Image (cartoon, helix red, strand yellow):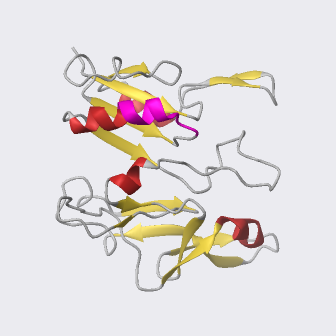
Amino acid sequence: EKPLLGLLSSLPVRGGYNPETGQSTLPWAIINQIETLFDIRDLTTDITSEALAFGTDINTLLLIHPKNLSESVQYAIEQFVFAGGQLLVFLDPFAEADNNGYGPDGFNRASELPLLEQWGMSFNNTLFVADDQYALTVGSSNQLTTRHLALLGIDQRGLSQSDVVSRDIDTVNLGFSGFIASKPDDNMSFHPLLQTSKSAASLTTTQILEIR
């Protein structure tokens, strides 16, 4: 019997209906991979403290691009973690798959998880990383190649070699990636698996259209 994984996502990672094309969409490839190891319970439309009671069914919760979470949902997540539950979170300052993310100002594709501040971490969802050391070479419209500072290929220089999760990976490619920083907190251990170089800088997401 496979272990049960709770899933909460604002993106149609398990497939759905695309109103722009009028067609159904398939589950994301990563979800198909996860389902080889876990049974998935989708909590997107039904997440309560009871549904997330640690030790009942779900011991691990996967959050993908959380947005507009109610206070009750955030409380349920916090209590789940405090009880010993495992939480895996994917945050993005500019989720290109978020087709519902355009607001009046043109940008509303950022993840939101205020709980991070209470847990000693900061995520500024208006910023993304540019890094000259890890910039990937891409083609341009004039058939020339250029190094794109926001499309990154982080190699082993930026990957933790002390953690089993990352030490055997050669390269991780990222596009318009955000970043998480730790706050001074004696009660929390912070172990980054990926890090930028000394040649990195943060830019605002409103600058993305200028460099794409």
Q: Is residue 176 left or right of residue 191?
A: right
Q: Which of 147 and 165 is in front in this view?
A: 165
**Residue found at the far top of this picture:** 1
Q: Is residue 143 above or below residue 16?
A: below
Image location (x, y in percent) of residue 115:
40, 48
Residue at 76 percent of width and 47 percent of height:
102
Q: Is residue 165 above or below residue 131?
A: above
Image location (x, y in percent) of residue 181:
38, 67
Residue at 58 percent of width and 63 percent of height:
176
Q: Is residue 97 above or below residue 153?
A: above
Residue at 73 percent of width and 55 percent of height:
107
Q: Is residue 51 left or right of residue 42?
A: left
User: Is 190 within the magenta?
Assistant: no
Image location (x, y in percent) of residue 70:
52, 33
Q: In which quarter of the image is the C terminus?
A: bottom right
Q: Which of 43 and 78 is in front in this view?
A: 78
Residue at 53 percent of width and 62 percent of height:
177
Q: Is residue 48 visible?
A: yes
Image location (x, y in percent) of residue 94:
62, 55
Q: In this view, does 64 lie above or below 158?
A: above
**Residue found at the far bottom of this picture:** 199
Q: Is residue 212 visible?
A: no
Q: Main secondary structure of the magenta part?
A: helix
The number of callouts visible is: 0
Q: In which quarter of the image is the N terminus?
A: top left
Q: What stretch is highlighted in magenta?
A: 68-76
User: Is 71 within the magenta?
Assistant: yes
Q: Which of 61 and 35 is in front in this view?
A: 61
Location of residue 67 (image quadrant): top right
